[in-house]
Amino acid sequence: MKRINMFYGLPDSFSPHYLLQSMTNTNTNDVEATVAQIMELIDAGADLVRVAVPGLKEVEALRKICRDVACRVSTIQKQIFVVADVHFLPEVAEKTASFVEKVRINPGNFASKDFETMALRAKSLFEICKRHDTIIRVGVNQGSLCDRIISRYGNTTEALVESALEWLKISEMYGFHKIVFSIKSSHVKTTMDANLLLYNKMVEMNKIYPFHLGVTEAANEMEGRVKSAIGIGGLLLHGIGNTFRVSLTENPVNEIYFSKILVGAIQDIKQNVYDNFSNGILNIHYPETSVEKWWAGVGALIGKWWLNNSIKEINIINPHFSFEEIKRLQDCVLQICNIKKTRTEIIACPSCGRTQYDIQAVLKEVKQRFSHYPHLKIAVMGCVVNGPGEMADADFGIVGSANDKVAVYKGKERISDFVSVQEALEILRNEGLRD
């Protein structure tokens, strides 16, 4: 089996070290602030840092950021990848590809009514990346699949995989192999199933490209960490995944801290047996004393079994935590696995340089005020780039715009102008959501 690893120049084997990733949430045009946050993430243990490049005006800012980071990193002798995160504009991807280590593109932004036209549109990007030895990350997101794919496969697991396979075909058409695949959804099981299906397709083709893992809109606190641990950890325990990001609507440094905790839990699980599964009942006895590592280990073990099995019941045992603490975690995982709903499902993007309001504060307030609706889903999204698409199945949503303004959605319909956050929360109350 040919394994293609473009991270350490080892074409026939993967490094056992998982590359940890986060993303800046500063304004990319604020070079000083963005460089400072990148260095903070590097100090925390990040191997890759993604930076949003919303448009052409941010390209030169990113160039300066890369120069400053390169100068600072050279003093600590660490290899670091700066990833340009590009949406909407293929020309932005082309311009950044000449000076970053890696560029993330969304297939939906190159979409066309036919495959041939899309492949031709992508040709110049592959040529530039080939010339400058730049890695391409193909980031397929369930919230932004192109109409051509959806019309054939629906908004399904198969659609996500077919979008990725199209780009594998295009890359090989142009003789380009420095490519990483990422398939994400805010639905944990969809994310896992799609990555497994793509991996199995690659096994059939006798070539496995690197995978970047993550669960989008995981939100924050315990729920965000456990949701990521299930989706990412379950795949890692099946041998799928080379880089990953725990997406949290918090300080990006917290993503790296929990990523390292998750890696430690994965190593423990590989060396010990903490679980048994029979007749749909999963029992987990993971006697960890650190609360976040306990969350990480329990989540990864659930993901390990959930990937290929239907779970009906989950029992968690740990003598180091109280009945209330165990019940809180158990309710959380039952909610994520759609076994038992006890509270509102609240999703939120982690934010990036495109977000222009205090999404962390708004998420906190939404959770405090509207968490007692077990059959509702509420989304808190940073911007209009991914927001409306990725929260399409939410009952209500808040989507950010410029100057601290947000819009309120009911289902797929926008029901307000761009208003202040407090006005948006009042609109939700008027829609029947009471504190």
Image (tube, grey):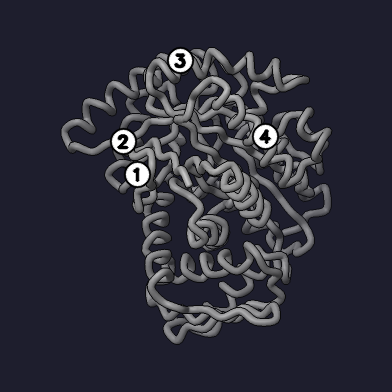
> Label for residue 80?
2
Considering only order in the chain, which callout, 4 or 2, is on the residue closer to the N terminus? 2
Q: Give how far apart the Cα atoms at labels 2 and 4 are.
A: 29 Å
Numbered label attached to residue 46: 1
Image location (x, y in percent) of residue 237: 49, 62
- Compared across the picture, whether 177 is left or right of 347 comes to left
Between residues 374 and 74, which one lies in front from this camera angle?
Answer: 74
Pointer 1 with pointer 2, Cβ within 8 A: yes
| 2 vs 3, front mark | 3
| Rendered location of residue 235, percent (x, y) | 53, 57
> Mark 3 or mark 1, which is nearer the start of the sequence?
1
Q: How far apart are the two marked residues, 1 and 3, measured between alpha carbons? A: 26 Å
Q: Distance between the residues labelled 1 and 2?
A: 8 Å
Instruction: Give the alpha-carbon distance from disc 4 to disc 3, as whole Å.
Output: 22 Å
The residue type indicated by label 1 comes to: Ala
Residue occupying the point 75% across, 62% down: 373
**Residue 215: mark in rendering:** none
Q: Is residue 66 above or below residue 24?
A: above
Q: Mark 1 or mark 2, which has the lower sequence index?
A: 1
What is the three-letter code of the residue carrying label 3? Answer: Ile
- Closest to the observer, 123 or 269: 123
- Which is nearer the N-term, disc 2 or disc 3? 2
Q: Which amino acid, by three-letter code, is at mark 2?
A: Ile
CB under 8 Å between discs 2 and 4 = no
Q: Which mark is residue 163?
A: 4
Residue 138 picture location, percent across and down: 55, 33
Residue that mark 3 sits on: 128
Whether residue 225 appears in this view of the structure is no
Residue shown at the point (69%, 58%) measured from the top left: 345
Mark 1 vs mark 3, foreground winner is 3
Q: Identify the image quadrant of residue 75.
A: top left
Q: In this view, does 22 lie above or below 116?
A: below
